[in-house]
Image (tube, rainbow, N blue to C red):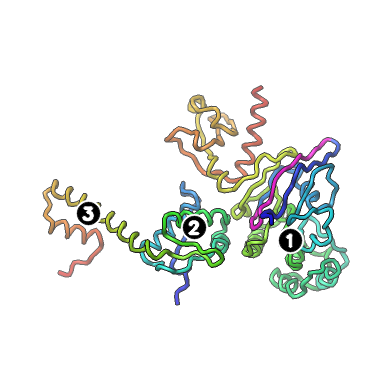
Amino acid sequence: MLYVEDKVNIQISNASSDPIYLQIKNQIKASIISGKLRAEEQLPSIRYLAKELRVSVITTKRAYDELEIEGFINSVQGKGSFVSIQNKELIREVQLRKVEASLLDAIKGAELAGLSIEELKDLLETLGGVEDDQ
Amino acid sequence: MTNNAIEIQNLTKNYDGFSLGPLNFNIPMGCMVGYIGENGSGKSTTLKAILGLIRADSGEVRIFGKNIKEYKPTLMNRIGVVFDDINIPGEMKVKEVGTFCKFAFDTWEETTFNHYLKRFELPKEKKIKALSRGMKMKLSLSIALSHQAELLILDEATSGLDPVVRDEILDILLDFLQDEKHTVLISSHILSDLEKAADYIAFLHNGQILFMEEKDMLVERYALCSLDHETIQNLDSDAIVGRRKHAFGQDLLVIRDLMPAGIEMVKPSIEDIMVYIIKGEENESIAL
């Protein structure tokens, strides 16, 4: 069985201009969006997270509070914080739409440069690191 | 039910040439609070007054909602105290300390104490007077953690200890704080590694609390930057909190939100904030 610690990687950088709570929030968010953390999965407690990262409890609480406001997690009094169920699909959807929008931009750009869709696909595969079979 | 571990109201104490207070602040339950200030700013006096070890001239201190003067014997079981000096006869051996403490605390737990002795690798056969400073400090902390205390008060306990020991102590304090009813109040003139984990910082200067705030807020509000004299002339004067002038420019502690875009700023440490705020005052008095 995988422990939740194996699914959430959190690295705090003092050199970053982002406040620490934001760094924590974004990294947990990334784990949720990527599906590493599944719906209903329990997150580490704010006190445990603060202890492990050696940051203030206020910092970890703020990260969780904002994740809750944005619908990524639910906190149940006395039980802990869990990855939200309903919004999981929504989050994927939002992410998918972002990808679609970026691709549409790329297609427009390709048209201007006179690239065919076929050539664009090749380019995408190269950039995405897909090996050419032939 | 109060959510404060300690409540301090209008606390004052006057000595010849030094007066503390009036102090008004609370220590929220479940938090680590760093009580910082220069040497002689009144930190130890405050902590002693909180514990009822010295008589305040006026004001009231409540611990867990109870007046310390009235409930001192019962409250002391719930408070773990680690001071600069250990209050145990020097001839006593480490292994005898447990027996000694059994009489001092109704809630004494011998097994917990032995667990900490082992964890800290304290030599049981050694006499207290033969222990190094670091060992005495670890012994003090072992005692403080072995009578079911819910509040730990540490006075300059980690200054003068090497970084490895301070690191161990930080881990112990963070373990202690896993219980949300537990509170740590730690005074220091050097916070360094401990400041990372503090939730609130109370800053004492010349016997007055300059601020008692969430550490995150402080670190976000202030920023450090190095600028040339000309650029500084064009800044909003409210933006500058403190400065260090040198021959080639100035280092500034500024309020981040009041700074124009495009100036490179870095996050300050709590020590930076402390030094610049005190220096800032001195600079103003020179300007007058």
Q: Which region shows up in magenta?
A: B17-32
Q: What amino acid does circle 2 point to?
A: Tyr
Q: Which residue is mark 3?
A: A103
Q: Which quadrant: the N terminus of chain B? A: bottom right
Checking the image for residue B134, the label placed there is 1
Q: Secondary structure at mark 3?
A: helix
> Callout 3 environment at 10 Å: few (<14), some (14 to 19), or many (20+)?
few
- Which chain letter matches label 2? A
Q: Residue at point 56% right, 43% down?
A: B268
Q: Residue at point 57% right, 56% down?
A: A57
Answer yes or no: is residue A46 visible: yes
Above or below residue B58? Residue B102 is: below
Indicate the position of residue A25 as horizontal and vertical percent values.
45, 56
Q: What amino acid does circle 3 point to?
A: Leu
Asked whether B39 or A48 is in front, the reply is: A48
- Which chain letter matches label 1? B
Q: Which residue is mark 2?
A: A64
Q: Residue at point 82% right, 64% down?
A: B130
Report the magenta stretch's main SS: strand
Q: Which circle, 2 or 1, is nearer the viewer? A: 2
